[in-house]
Amino acid sequence: MEKYCDNCCPKTSCKNNGNCAACVKKHRDTDSLPYCLFPNNDGDKSLRHFYEKLKERFENEK
């Protein structure tokens, strides 16, 4: 598969690095978020953790 966006992802160790379509498919299949979209890349990329971080963010904006 052709690379669609070189240098858009800082996680160069991933086999899908630079291939956003393959990356999104992989993360959709594993119910997680790509490195580039997660608000803080502390290792837990699950959707549950993402929602917890969003909740914290919006609660702190009050």
Image (cartoon, rainbow, N blue to C red):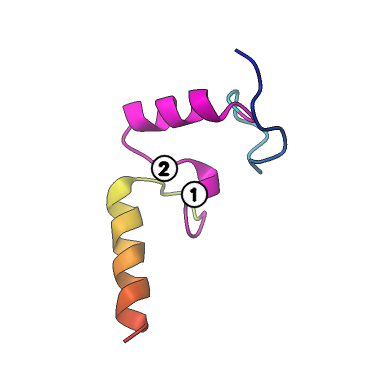
Q: x%, y% of residue 29?
A: 33, 26
Q: Vertically, is 5 above or below 44?
A: above
**Quick check: marks 1 and 2 in contact, CB under 8 Å?**
yes
Foreground pick, 2 / 48: 2
Query: Disc 1 designates what residue?
Result: 37
Label 2 packing within 10 angstroms: few (<14), some (14-19), many (20+): some
Foreground pick, 18 / 42: 18
Residue 29 is left or right of residue 16, and the answer is left
Q: Residue 33, labelled with which disc?
A: 2
Quadrant where the C terminus is found in the figure: bottom left
Residues shaded magenta = 17-41
The kind of residue tagged 1 is: Leu
Q: CA distance from mark 1 to mark 2?
A: 7 Å
Asked if residue 15 lies in the magenta stretch, the reply is no
Query: For residue 26, what is the image quadrant?
Result: top left
The residue at the far right in this view is: 7
The kind of residue tagged 2 is: Leu
